[in-house]
Amino acid sequence: MWKKLRIPPISRVTHRLSLGGPMIRLDGKAVAAARRELLKTRVERFVTQHGRKPGLAVVIVGEDPASHVYVKNKVKTTTELGMASRHIELPHTASEAEVLETVAKLNRDAAVDGILVQLPLPKHIDSNKVVEAIDAEKDPDGLTTANLGLLFAGRKRVAPCTPWGVMAILEHYKIPVAGKRVAVIGRSNIVGKPMAQLLTEADATVTLCHSRTKDLAHHTRDAEIVVVAAGKQRFIGRESFAKDAVVIDVGMHRPDSGEFAGKLLGDVKFEELEGHVSAATPVPGGVGPMTIQMLMENTVTLAENRASKN
Ligand code: NAD
């Protein structure tokens, strides 16, 4: 019943890893752009076959400026891809019951294939309860316990967008994962844990490191691939990685003050890596652009799944 999902191959491989050569900058922006062209074709095919556009609804509660920027980008990308976009704004005074009712309405709406509730929600609303209220068949973030459960049971419907985007970068650059020693730093439900699961499914041998891990550098130096998602600005550099390792930086920080005020930073000191590791994702332009792309792909996957059932 469950299709084994594979990331569609990209024929246009721009680089191949060569050990000892110059470091390859893993360009998430270019990977996302290449995948977007393929996705447009998938959307067109869906419209021809089913006479409607795949639809993504985004719910935002409150006035947080950063959240509004994220939502604006998601709405823009949805429309550019030829998909239907629904944008629901609720005031920060909205009650939990009102947010749950909004989600329930979208669950019942046949034109909606994906429902995304922008996090964080105001403090008086239980985010877990709201995410859990999303119909798992309409959950493009893959964050409902039903979808996380399927992922960990090896029968994934859709995977959380950021780790799924990391897998797409590795696939695009033909970086072998099977049999490799991989260290993942971070164990959140949104990044670290699903990342470790996706890599395990791809036959890597994964060490999951976290804030209580002793001698972190021992684990990272032993790894051939390191995925850093600790949420700590520029906390790890050259000395923590093996020669010729592949480094994926998931971190995203924009400090208000100090040396890097206003700049987008990762968890890794990227400028230290040249001449040491074989490939690395920069920030910005690495994992970040992949997240929104995978959100769109997941929405189309859910639309296709629902259409094939009806
Ligand atoms: P989180 O705070 O929920 O989790 C951080 C994890 O790192 C925890 O599991 C913790 O145990 C671990 N950790 C913290 N300090 C550590 C240390 N010193 N050594 C080892 N492990 C340590 O964060 P998250 O939601 O998983 O996000 C991680 C980072 O990724 C953040 O910077 C976030 O902004 C970024 N992020 C980026 C995207 C994107 O689109 N690029 C998406 C989601 C998250």
Image (tube, helix red, strand yellow):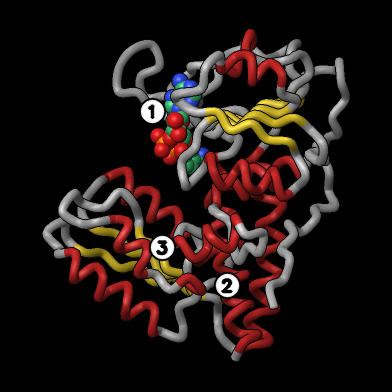
- Ligand 1 lies under 8 Å from the Cβ of mark 3: no
Classed neighbour count for the residue bearing mark 1: other residues with Cα under 10 Å, few (<14), some (14–19), many (≥20) = few
Three-letter amino acid code of the residue under disc 2: Leu
Q: What element does badge 1 sit on?
A: loop
Could you say where residue 74 lies in the image, as x and y percent from the top left?
45, 57
In the image, residue 229 lies at what x, y percent? 52, 32
- Disc 3, disc 2: CB below 8 Å? no
Q: Which residue is mark 3?
A: 116
Determine whether the beta carbon of the residue marked 2 sits less than 8 angstroms from the nearest atom of ligand 1.
no
Q: Name the residue at 72% across, 50% down.
A: 201
Give the residue furthest to the left: 93
Residue 303's place in the image compared with 154, above or below, is below
In the displayed structure, does residue 216 sit left or right of residue 200? left
The residue labelled by disc 1 is: 254
**Residue 120, above or below 145:** above
- Secondary structure under tag 3 reads strand
Gap in Å between the C-alphas at discs 1 and 3? 24 Å
Q: Identify the mark nearer the N-term, 1 or 2.
A: 1
For residue 2, side relative to residue 135 (left or right): right
> Quarter of the image holding residue 90?
bottom left
x and y, in percent, of residue 263 in the image:
42, 24
Mark seen at residue 138: none
Task: Work out which quarter of the rendered image holds the C terminus and state it.
Answer: bottom right
Q: CA distance from mark 3 to mark 2?
A: 13 Å
Q: Is residue 163 visible?
A: yes
Q: Which residue is mark 2?
A: 302
Of residues 221 and 37, the one nearer the viewer is 221
Q: Is residue 42 above or below residue 35?
A: below
Disc 3 marks which amino acid? Leu
Q: Nearer the viewer, residue 5 or 151?
A: 151
Name the spot of residue 154 as percent of width and height, x first.
67, 59
For the residues labelled 1 and 2, the Cα–Cα distance comes to: 33 Å
